[in-house]
Image: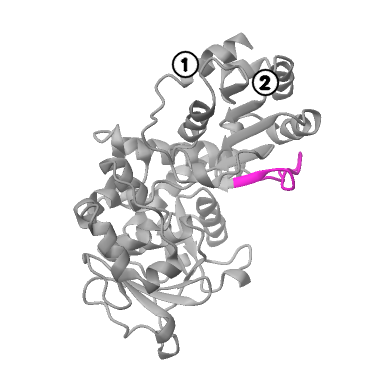
Amino acid sequence: MEVLFERHAEYLTDVPTGFERELMQTIDWDSRLILIRGPKGVGKSTLMQQYILDHYDVSDRHALYCSADSSYFSTHTLVDTAAAFVRQGGRHLFIDEIHRYDGWSKEIKDIYDLYKGLKVVLSGSSLIQLNDGQADLSRREDVYDMPGLSFREYLWFRTGKKAEPVRLDYLLENAGQFCSQIRSLYRPLEFFADYLRMGYYPFSFEKKKTFKTLIENVTSYIIDTELTKYRGVSPENTRKIKALLQIIAEMFPYQVDISKLASSVSIDRVTIIRYLKYLNEAKLIRNLFTEMDKITDLQKPDKILLDNTNLIYSYSIKEPEIGTVRECFFCNQLASAGYMVEYGGLKTGDFRINKDLVIEVGGAGKDYSQIDENDIKKAALAIDNVDVASRKKIPLWAFGFLY
């Protein structure tokens, strides 16, 4: 245990404390078992470490932070570690990278059942399944999915000025007033292009010069390691999957031709649909459907975007299509804030939100001509390169304040 406490102190030495993610306030930290899921690089480790620093002294042995990929766990089990920690008065155990520990769910279930006074916080891959065939934690565990930075969080991080999140219904009804309040803090368009290119991942603030390389490292790790291990993707196809991401990054935002997509990377149609599902689960792409509640397991998506705009700029050899970037940003921010986003189809507007609201995304010339007349009353436009809201024409950047 001494080794873990020494490493605990080292981990907490250089944790940034001036900015905390909004998820910090959302999590019920009093829960006995918490899982924070998210793709590599979004800040899960930092969030856990910040919580410890907010509530414990570094030398306080009531809390312990460790990583499941540590060499320590090559000769020690999670259960034995928890037992030793509790014997020494431990109350709050934080285990990072839990998916790196084989058979983790069964041991965590044992810890939960054995040590009722111990609170356990885990972090892991987006691909983690609560019922993995070894133990079902779905009734025990509070799960939180952690996205990258919203545009609002990025501005707070970069300028030190904090705006509170806004609900979508409030934004739609009070867009003019809201945008005016935001412009009193900063000029959103001054920062928007930078956010689209490299603002979604928190490490961009420290690693600007190597940002694209880090993005490639993150995606390569997810594809080469996580998809092969947790979804059974053939290692022979990982290069093809990376080529697929580049194709998606440079696609026009139109409907999907699966046969053409499969042919372009030499993967059969059934396999590529399965891979698209896995990539969506890994938060590398976003599969959009016209009716989410009616999709089948191997149904092709009606539209595909990369998960966030940083991936688009990193994977595109040429300058990305601006329409693709706009739609990617919009879908990412809405979905990350917890809204259901469906593809509207060719005649009903770009996107349908929570089954009801229709929103068309575009530039200054965008109007309601592509929205079905039956949906006009409950429709809005998300317009790029504008600062001022006009009726239901709302600046695109404003949708980056939902979380």
Reading the chain from its start, which is encountered first: label 1 or label 2?
1
14 lies left or right of 340: left
List x then y, in percent, for residue 166: 41, 60
144 lies left or right of 396: right
Q: Find numbered disc 2 in the image and state the secondary structure of the residue it sits on.
A: loop
Instruction: Identify the residue shown where x is 47% and y is 31%.
Output: 50
Res 324 seen here: no
Q: What crowding class fits label 2: few (fewer than 14 Cα within 10 Å), some (14-19), or many (20 or more)?
A: some
Q: Compare residues 328 and 64 and report the one nearer the observer.
A: 64
The span shown in magenta is 129-143
| Badge number at residue 153 | none
Instruction: Identify the residue shown where x is 30% and y is 78%.
Output: 391
Q: Compare residues 113 and 100 and report the one nearer the observer.
A: 113
Q: Find numbered disc 1 in the image and state the secondary structure of the residue it sits on.
A: helix
Q: Compare residues 259 and 309 and report the one nearer the observer.
A: 309
Q: Label 1 belongs to which residue? A: 10
Image vertical order of residue 331 relative to residue 155, above or below? below
Q: Residue furthest bottom?
A: 373
List x then y, in percent, for residue 145: 54, 48
Q: What crowding class fits label 1: few (fewer than 14 Cα within 10 Å), some (14-19), or many (20 or more)?
A: few
Q: Label 2 belongs to which residue? A: 90
Judge depth for marks 1 and 2 and give the one in front: 2
Q: Quadrant of the C terminus?
A: bottom left
List x then y, in percent, for residue 385: 21, 64
Q: Is residue 125 magenta?
A: no
